[in-house]
Amino acid sequence: MKREISQFVIERAAAGDESAFGEIYFLLRDSIYGFAFRMTGEKTSAEDITQEVFMFLIQNPEKFDISRGTLYSFLCGVARNKIFNHLKKKGLIYEDPAESEELENVANSFEKTPLQQLLDQEFSLQIEQCIARLSTLQREVLFLREIEECSYEEIARITATAVGVVKSRLFRARRQLAQEMEPYLKIKEEMYL
Amino acid sequence: MNCVETQENLDALIDGELAGALQANAEAHLKECPACRAEYEKRQAVGAYLRQNWQISASAELDKQVFGAFRQFQRQKQLVEPSAPAQETRTEKNAWFGTPWLSWGTAFAVLVLTAFAAFQIGKTSAARDYAASEKSFDRAPLAENGAPENSKSIETPQIQTISVPVIQEKIVKIPVVREKIVTRYVYINNKTGGDGAADPRSNLRAPESSPLAVKSQLEDNQYSTQVNLTGFQFVSDLKPQIIKSENNEK
């Protein structure tokens, strides 16, 4: 997925050029918003976080160092901090028992998108329940890999962890989902045959 | 590659993060092992579902919200920094015809002019220093050790730092070999010189019996010597001599 932004455009946006800012915003808006929405499960929170992320860039352009990574991974890192602060405040952090002994309750607060309303409500709800049972960190790497198509190295940079940890979380997330989703995916397949 | 190793590398294979021999071995095993192949297909299905259902776009309302916040921040910035002009919308390919090009051109012109001015100042200063030192040693009688009488050591000029808007320049004086041209004028005492004819044996030092008033003074870091030549007649000037010395002037 191409998300290249030149240093010149970033500098122009930081200097107040609205068209340069628009170029950055429209290229990365859906990535940041989707990340925030899939992690928080709330449209309003996701919108607030998205706005905060882009304003952080404009107000603190000196914090972005192009030698350390792309603007996309920088903004994802900023978004991640805000997402986790939000989840902590609401007590919605769920940690994988394999990674931590603490286990918190998961609030099933995922909102449905308009697309999901068109699908069979029972199946989509069941599958979303499966996803909700993943740990927060597993959900995070799943989104960055499946939707944002980030490499393992880029995911490691965004999540401030090692590539091995990324692989481990992805492995457990997919295995768990594959086991839980299998019956529903089979039934759905038969429905559309 | 066995089932355990294949299962460990399944995600990397799905995500294109496996390469070379590992990829070939994993793919070969999948062809032979139905269990691993089933697991591989299940994980692919998970990814396919997520890609189909997890894509989401932000609303137009969010766009208004974000751009509103951007414009408000710029307005507040203008209030705090009124001297900074509002930035014009400019695409990258027009940058050469906009402010950045003019700034670079102006900076370069200032740099050239400053360097030229500094060179001229340095040249004049060096010439003045040389002239001053020339005066201080030109007519001063020499003492027995070769140093000028009543001479005082001339202080080395201080390193001068000039601050300019674009660059900072330092004028540093470095030791050089001094080359001095000494011109000796021969005067003959009218009283002892006979009919006024030139006496080539005469030299600068007047006979002890003749009064020769020499007055040397140091003023404004410049040495000057006045010699009372009353009663002396100029005869000729000798061939110039070049005296070279790194430290002691002779």
Image: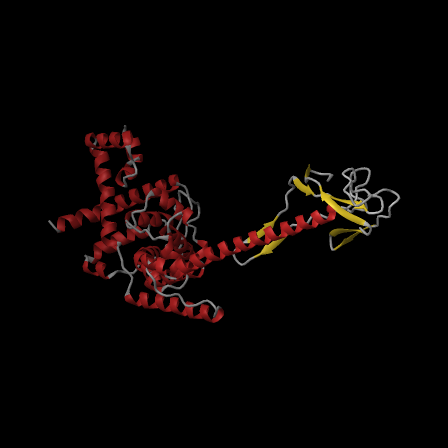
Using the image as rendered, state which of residue A65 and residue B7 is in the foreground: A65
Observer able to see residue A46: no
Q: Residue at x 37, y 55 (%)?
A: A8
Q: Is residue A58 above or below residue B155?
A: below
Q: Is residue B120 above or below residue A16?
A: above
The quadrant of the rendering that contains the N terminus of chain B is top left
Residue B157 is situated, as x and y percent measured from the top left of the image, at 68, 50
Q: Is residue B78 above or below residue B93?
A: below
The coloring applied to the image is secondary structure
Single out the residue that lies furthest toward the top: B1
Using the image as rendered, state which of residue B151 and residue B113 is in the foreground: B151
Observer able to see residue B60: yes
Using the image as rendered, state which of residue A55 and residue B186 is in the foreground: B186
Q: Quadrant of residue A178?
A: top left
Q: Quadrant of residue B237?
A: top right
Residue A180 is situated, as x and y percent measured from the top left of the image, at 26, 46
Residue A129 is situated, as x and y percent measured from the top left of the image, at 29, 53
Q: Residue at x 20, y 48 (%)?
A: A185
Residue B214 is situated, as x and y percent measured from the top left of the image, at 82, 49
Q: Residue at x 22, y 58 (%)?
A: A116
Label count reads 0
Single out the residue that lies furthest toward the front: B195
Q: Quadrant of residue A125?
A: bottom left
Single out the residue that lies furthest toward the left: A193
Q: Is residue B192 above or below residue B29?
A: below
The quadrant of the rendering that contains the C terminus of chain B is top right
